[in-house]
Amino acid sequence: MRGIRSSEQVIAAMNLTPTNGLDEKFLLDRLIQDCAAMSVNTELATLLAEVRAHAFIVVATDNIDCFADTFRRVQRTAAPWSRAAATLTDAVGLFDDLICSSDVGVCKKNDPNRFFGGWLDAHGLTIAEATLIDDKTTNCDAFDLNGGTAVRWDANRDSIAELRHTLAGWMTHSLN
């Protein structure tokens, strides 16, 4: 996930014996299809669409190169986001950009300034002006320690109303 090896290299290292259509190309194609079909939390997407009028909405993910490649390929031809979005392909129009660990060579928790810094610098922002919504406490703690505002939110445990309230407070603070 730090871009040391590409998806193709990982698949090649499996040393598959092609049988019944199962080969390296099939696995890579399947990986790309699965990335495009990843489900999206529609409640979160709806909330982010509301926030988008006041802030950039960027996917920040610790992920592999084929996810980043798929995201960018789909984004080039994406329709505008709609509330009916259920997959990454459907929702990609909601996002302004993507920061992926395989592109920047580091995961969020290991070096938030390096992970986010290039994107923030390019947009004239600092980490202090950014909010991270993440389900991992380690990512949130690292982001907070580096001057950002992190909100730990897990769709399986936390309410969207709580997240809405937290973001409203951050946006009021960040707009002042």
Image (cartoon, helix red, strand yellow):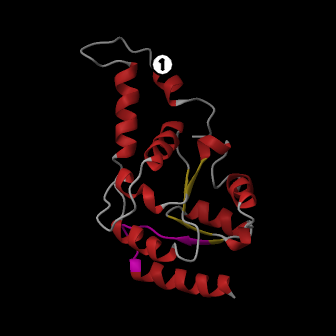
Q: Tell me if residue 167 is in the magenta stretch.
A: no
Tell me the quadrant of the picture where the N terminus can be found: top right
Q: Which residues are magenta?
A: 150-160
- Where is 117 relative to 130, above or below? above
Q: Which residue is mark 1?
A: 12
Residue at figure coordinates x 50%, y 45% from the top left: 72
Residue at figure coordinates x 50%, y 60% from the top left: 95
For the residue pair 91 and 131, the one nearer the viewer reads as 91
Residue at figure coordinates x 49%, y 37% from the top left: 66
Element marked by disc 1: helix
Question: Residue 68 location in percent, x, y?
Answer: 52, 43
Question: Residue 128 location in percent, x, y?
Answer: 73, 72
Tell me the quadrant of the picture where the C terminus can be found: bottom right
Which picture quadrant has residue 145? Answer: bottom right
For the residue pair 79 and 101, the one nearer the viewer reads as 79
Question: Mark 1 packing: few (<14 Cα in 10 Å), some, or many (20+)?
Answer: some
State left or right for residue 53 relative to residue 32: right
Which picture quadrant has residue 18? Answer: top left
State left or right for residue 54 relative to residue 82: right
Residue at the left extreme of this rendering: 20
Question: Residue 77 location in percent, x, y?
Answer: 42, 48
Residue at figure coordinates x 67%, y 62% from the top left: 142
Q: How many labels sit on residues?
A: 1
State left or right for residue 38 relative to residue 105: left
Question: Residue 92 location in percent, x, y?
Answer: 43, 55
Magenta: main secondary structure: loop
Name the amino acid, label 1.
Answer: Ala
